[in-house]
Image (cartoon, helix red, strand yellow):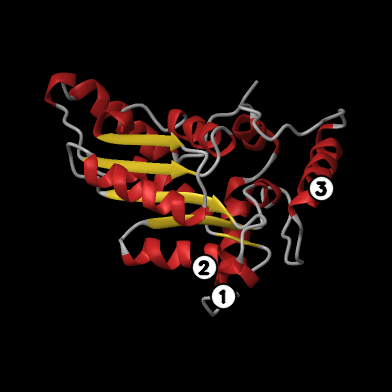
Amino acid sequence: MARKAKIDNAILKRLTRDEKSRPVATREIRKYFLIVCEGEKTEPNYFEALKNDLPVGVLSVFNIDIDGTGKNTTSLVDHALRMKDKASFHYDEVWAVFDRDSFSPTQFNTAITKAAANKIKTAWSNEAFELWYLLHFNYHDSAISRKQYKAILEREIIRITGKNFSYRKNDPAMYQLLKEIGNMQNAIRYAHRLHKSRNDQRYDTHNPCTTVYLLVKKLCALCTEKF
């Protein structure tokens, strides 16, 4: 049976009490989040699953829009800015999710610095989003090419489950699988460790590294916000 997200029981109990004691009609959206993803399926699928796994009541007061654009690096940041500006309401936080992949150092570095200059947060990965998946199982501090992620991920999942597994990049079940056999807290800790080991803005050289953990922490922390 699938396990639910690892959220403190005290928080869950409080949310349940609030859910019973507060009329639905009196709730209003308190904050608006926009997550704009480079990928059209892989990243949106993951964050939609995480969003839908938040405790009851969270989505009654937090609006989380997730958009898979098919755009990349600077064009993705530009798209996020347009969406932010055209919205009929104020987005409290806007996130751009993209990878290093084979884009030039200039494209990748400029996207990160441009986003920061425009108050857009970035959940970037060098080289690919799948690094976040791998960190659910082990710490990786050696450079990995995007072509290697699939084989390493399959090896880890087969090792744990004892069953054949072939990774599909757009698999909508990855969040659930990682929750069942991986460790998100370890992934956050490992990603933070990698991130803090880099002390310059040559982001294209930071391989492996991912700041996806920052966005995951933010979404998971919504359940601790006071209603």
> How far across and down, in percent of the image, does residue 162 sit?
87, 32
**Quarter of the picture holding the N terminus:** top right
Q: Which residue is located at x 53 percent, y 63 percent?
A: 107
> How far across and down, in percent of the image, does residue 137 sit?
72, 49
- Crowdedness near tag 1: few (<14), some (14–19) or many (≥20) residues, C-alpha within 10 Å: few
Q: CA distance from mark 2 to mark 3?
A: 27 Å
**Quarter of the picture holding the C terminus:** top left
The three-letter amino acid code for the residue at tag 3 is Ile
Point out which mark residue 109 bears.
Answer: 2
Foreground: disc 2 or disc 3: 2
Q: Which residue is located at x 55 percent, y 72 percent?
A: 196
Point out which mark residue 30 bears.
Answer: none
Q: Residue furthest bottom?
A: 199
Which residue position holds label 3?
Answer: 152
Q: Which residue is located at x 30 percent, y 42 percent?
A: 83
Q: Secondary structure at mark 2?
A: helix
Compared with 148, 116 (above or below) is below
Of residues 114 and 20, the one nearer the viewer is: 114
Which residue position holds label 1?
Answer: 202
